């Protein structure tokens, strides 16, 4: 089992889906987990669930698209636990679903604020805290759409590709100072993010994965927590797929 005893982890978007699975695994490994989410009540419920299971967790409300709030999130972690060792920049949204020639400008910018700038703000404020204790590890949540495209989701595709690039740039800057930074690219995972899809689209998504099904949040968390752990000590600056062979085609 991977151990994170005595360490502090922030998981953005930790109240639902992939983030919630990462929260569970890190807490089971002994970390104190900061469940950071736009939805405060859901974040509090998740933290309470962790505590009930014998783990240590705090909830904090944050909009990762707002730099000041991300700084406050990092300050909260340090105030409560005295340190920051792990950061999972996981919060993300879907949409706007429209061809590039029709995409609403506010939809484009709104998506970039969360899926790209949110990751940048996490790095911007998280890294200086990690440096104070000699290092740490970060996972940025990209997607298969960080390496391939799909029609009708240009903003999402662009943001996820940018997250992969940002991950490489940050790793080059901080790996020698003890902070490993990687990106993860899940295929379609059965989470509430897919709730908006109609039944036919949802079923069609399964067929895009040669493995014949969607992924589970736990299967993404297994990779994320491995990358955060000391076992992944030589892994930094890279992008790791967990996609049922989606991108192998
Ligand atoms: P989800 O909707 O189940 O969970 C996302 C969480 O993020 C929610 O709790 C939501 O409240 C929170 N959130 C949304 N906007 C936020 C903001 N501005 N600030 C803080 N929190 C915010 O989604 P998920 O499927 O678990 O997705 C998690 C990440 O994985 C996202 O970055 C997503 O792009 C990525 N991803 C998902 C899939 C998939 O198929 N589900 C595939 C590849 C990548």
Image (spheres, grey):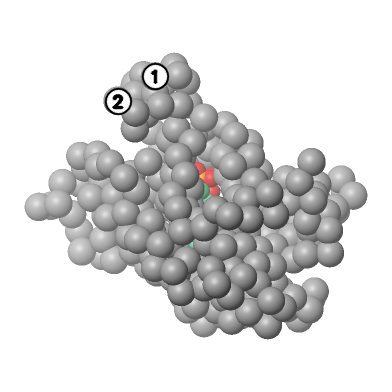
Vertical arrangement, residue 176 with respect to residue 57, above or below: below
In this view of the protein, can residue 122 be seen by the observer?
A: no
Secondary structure under tag 2 reads: loop
Residue found 31% across the figure and 45% down from its top: 147
Q: Which residue is mark 2?
A: 249
- Name the quadrant of the C terminus: top left
Secondary structure under tag 1 reads: loop
Is residue 70 toward the left or the right of residue 188 in the image? right
Q: Residue 174: x percent and y percent? A: 52, 73
Residues under numbered marks 2 and 1 in contact, where contact means CB atoms less than 8 Å apart:
yes
Q: Residues within 10 Å of mark 1 (few under 14, many from 20)?
A: some
**Residue 207, picture quadrant:** top left
Residue nearer the viewer, 203 or 186? 186
Q: Residue 167: x percent and y percent? A: 43, 62
Residue found 79% across the figure and 41% down from its top: 1
**Residue 211, picture quadrant:** top left
């Amino acid at each position: 089992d991977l151990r994170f005893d005595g360490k502090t982890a922030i998981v953005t978007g930790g109240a639902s889906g992939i983030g919630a699975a990462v929260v569970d695994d890190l807490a089971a490994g002994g970390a104190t987990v900061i469940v950071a989410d736009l939805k405060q009540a859901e974040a509090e419920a998740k933290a309470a669930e962790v505590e009930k299971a014998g783990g240590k967790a705090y909830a904090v409300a944050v909009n990762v698209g707002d730099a000041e709030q991300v700084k406050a999130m990092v300050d909260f972690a340090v105030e409560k636990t005295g340190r920051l060792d792990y950061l999972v920049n996981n919060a993300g949204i879907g949409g706007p679903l429209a061809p590039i020639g029709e995409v609403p400008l506010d939809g484009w910018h709104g998506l970039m604020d969360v899926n790209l700038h949110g990751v940048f703000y996490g790095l911007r404020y998280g890294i200086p805290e990690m440096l104070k204790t000699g290092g740490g590890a970060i996972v940025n949540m990209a997607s298969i759409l960080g390496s391939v495209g799909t029609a009708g989701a240009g903003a999402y595709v662009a943001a996820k590709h940018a997250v992969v690039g940002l991950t490489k740039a940050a790793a080059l800057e901080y790996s020698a100072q003890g902070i490993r930074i990687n990106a993860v690219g899940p295929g379609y995972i059965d989470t509430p993010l897919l709730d908006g899809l109609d039944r036919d689209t949802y079923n069609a998504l399964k067929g895009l994965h040669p493995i014949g099904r969607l992924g589970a949040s736990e299967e993404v968390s297994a990779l994320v927590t491995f990358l955060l752990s000391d076992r992944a000590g030589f892994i930094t600056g890279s992008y790791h797929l967990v996609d049922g062979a989606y991108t192998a085609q």
